[in-house]
Image (tube, rainbow, N blue to C red):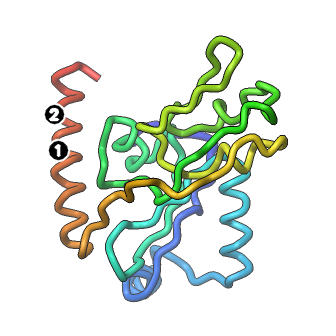
Amino acid sequence: MGKECEHPLETCFVFNEFAEGLIDSGLAREITTEEALKILRHCEEIGLVHNVDNAEGHLRTLCNCCSCSCAVMKIINNGGTYAGAPSRFLVKHDEEKCILCEECAAICPTESIHKENGKMIFNSATCIGCGLCVSVCKQGANYMVPREKYPRISATHKDLWAKIGKESIVGILKNKILGK
């Protein structure tokens, strides 16, 4: 996105024929299950968001996105709903266990958590259900529950990418108009 950050670059995974094509062209490499799990754990520890391409029945990518330079996270934080649809889960908070350390707010990639009047406030409208606030909370005050209404998942990758394209164009135009 034209801006460097301190996050690692080798964080995204591709699968099936998509992976084969990228490996054959020298743009990707095959890794072991152990390597994949190590990368996933490290990505979660440093606050990257696990994000899969949301098309029914066929997984092509699993990215680990940072909110500072990832195009998908930029789209999400600008109100996009297709590039990185929310998970089927939502964070819940137990005030009695919370010590107001604000680590959950610091790691939230959508800035959906803040402290107000001596309480942690969680915005379920902008929460993408990534679970980072749960993994960082040493007190166990945050936990995930299924959403009452699940987000819609595109039937095919073609449908998904058409929606992402439209959403991206709208976001670019909106930013140009607003001078961002």
- Corner quadrant of residue 151: bottom left
Give SS at disc 2.
helix
Q: Where residue 97 sits in the image (x, y, percent)?
A: 81, 36
For image coordinates 75% across by 44% down, the residue present is: 136
Say which residue appears at 67% left-offset and 55% top-offset: 44
Q: Taking 160 as reference, is 31 left or right? A: right
Q: Residues within 10 Å of mark 1 (few under 14, many from 20)?
A: few
* The quadrant where residue 175 appears: top left
Q: Nearer the viewer, residue 34 or 54?
A: 54
Which quadrant of the figure contains the N terminus?
top left
Q: Residues within 10 Å of mark 2 (few under 14, many from 20)?
A: few
Mark 1 touches mark 2? (CB < 8 Å): yes
Residue 127 x, y percent position in the rendering = 48, 41
Residue at the limit of the structure toward the top, as seen here: 117
Position of the C terminus, as image quadrant, is top left
Residue 80: which quarter of the image? top left
**From what the image shows, is residue 116 above or below residue 64?**
above
**Amino acid under disc 1:** Ile
Nearest the viewer among 162 and 30 is 162
Q: Is residue 117 left or right of residue 178?
A: right
Residue 173's disc is: 2
**Percent from the top left, x then y, of residue 131?**
61, 51
Mark 2 residue type = Leu
State the mark number for residue 169. Answer: 1
* Up-down relation of residue 171 to residue 148 (above or below): above
